[in-house]
Image: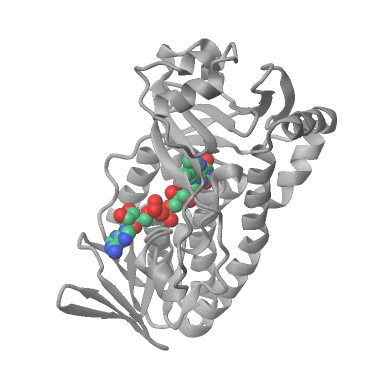
Amino acid sequence: MAKAMPKHIAVIGAAIAGLSAALAAAKAGHHVTIFGQAPRHLGGALQLAPNGFAALARLGIEGTIAPHMTRLSAIELRSARTNGCLSIIDHEAPVRRDYASVGRAQLVSALLDAAEAHKHIQFDERLIEGIKAGNRSASLQIKDEILSFDVIIGADGKDGLARQLISPQAKEAATRCALRTAVPAATLPRTFSAKRCQLWLGDGFHLVSYPFADGAEVNLVLCTKDSAEENHEMIAAHVKDNPVLACLADDEITWHRTPLPEASQLATWRKGHVILVGDAAHFMPPHLAQGAGQTLEDAASLYEALVQHDDMTSALKGWSVRRARTLAPIIERAQSTGALMRLSGPFSRLRNAAIELGGQRLIESWLKNIWHA
Ligand SMILES: Cc1cc2nc3c(=O)[nH]c(=O)nc-3n(C[C@H](O)[C@H](O)[C@H](O)COP(=O)(O)OP(=O)(O)OC[C@H]3O[C@@H](n4cnc5c(N)ncnc54)[C@H](O)[C@@H]3O)c2cc1C
């Protein structure tokens, strides 16, 4: 419970960051209004690593999400050229590690159910048109109406108003993109149904595949250089020579393209009583599968900061500095992982040879501080 008097907190955005931050603030004893509509038609899935599991437990909602998770026993790295296995990161031995996939729609709807059940959380589906930060309060604008709050949490994503308020930056066009789809497992060869994450490293691209929804569906993401080609042509060009992946060049599979800008670090996550969480604070390319996991960590650590401080300003100040410092090396690591994954020509073959030689230990040491952050 909050040491200070309960405050009225506004959250902008009703997706993973907004819902988890609202649950954190309400758990700390504050009254919360969430603005915006929860995304209703989300497709696909994401991976949750041990730090994401730990954050759910710190928020006390691990039991709500658990039924929607599909445990993944390993990450298998393969050459996209030869299909040979380069290395396996085993999640079951020598230690059992929490690692799972979860459908995006299922995750958001479980968080939404938890938020709707909380007596101190209310919803307002309107879109916010302006934000003002003060030193002891903050306000929102919706058409001609100005609404005042003690604190505003900006969870409105990487292109949202809150990030612009705190760090107005010129946006650079993305040169890379992700082609994403989710398909019924029964329509693909059995290898895609194995309860593990499979990662094919290719010449200038990589492709990730893992099952979700208890194995009923398979999530597929191909990251590559953006081009003017149609999605199907791009997929076919990347997979046609691989005996396992070639089946993905099927006109019946609909791929969705998402631009992947480079990550950019914000100098600060706070302006007065406005703070950022989720992609609004720490957008990073998805190469470490950490965006949502770190978003859940934002919420868990925010809850802890709110219950530890009597004074709201000190809580926000201390929390935002600590989280930005923690995330800086993780964002850098996501960038450098992307740089390794996009190596082309002889460099891509050298990379694959190094992974084959270094094995599980090399990759574990690359990821260790992130999964246990
Ligand atoms: C290809 C790809 C694969 C990924 N894989 C993984 C993975 O395996 N594991 C992982 O942990 N992460 C992964 N991520 C990252 C993860 O998807 C994001 O970090 C996470 O979804 C961010 O959630 P968010 O709530 O911060 O932002 P968003 O999902 O962008 O939500 C922002 C919300 O704010 C709302 N909003 C915006 N403006 C306003 C306004 N003015 N008023 C009201 N509402 C507003 C929007 O409508 C939206 O609902 C991946 C990302 C990509 C692109």
**Rendered view: 260 above or below 246:** below
Say which of 363 and 122 sits in front.
363
The quadrant of the image that shows the N terminus is bottom left
Q: Nearer the viewer, residue 338 or 184?
A: 338
Determine the residue positioned at 29% across, 47% down: 39
Q: Residue furthest front?
A: 228
| Image-based side of 161 in relation to 219, left or right | left
Q: Is residue 117 visible?
A: no
Give the residue drawn at x 50%, y 11%: 189
Q: Quadrant of residue 365?
A: top right
Residue 235's place in the image compared with 149, above or below, is: above
Residue at x-position 62% and y-position 29%? 199
Left or right: 351 in relation to 59: right
Q: From where the camera sits, is residue 88 visible?
A: yes
Q: Residue 84's spot in the image, x, y percent?
A: 71, 17
Name the colour scheme.
one colour
x and y percent of residue 187 in the render?
Answer: 41, 13
Q: Quadrant of the C terminus?
A: bottom right
Q: Is residue 237 above or below residue 338?
A: above
174 displayed left or right of 362? left
Q: Position of residue 35 (x, y in %)?
A: 27, 63
Q: Residue furthest right?
A: 357
Tell me which residue sits at (36%, 85%) in the image.
137
Residue 93 in which image quadrant: top right
Q: Nearer the viewer, residue 318 or 341?
A: 341
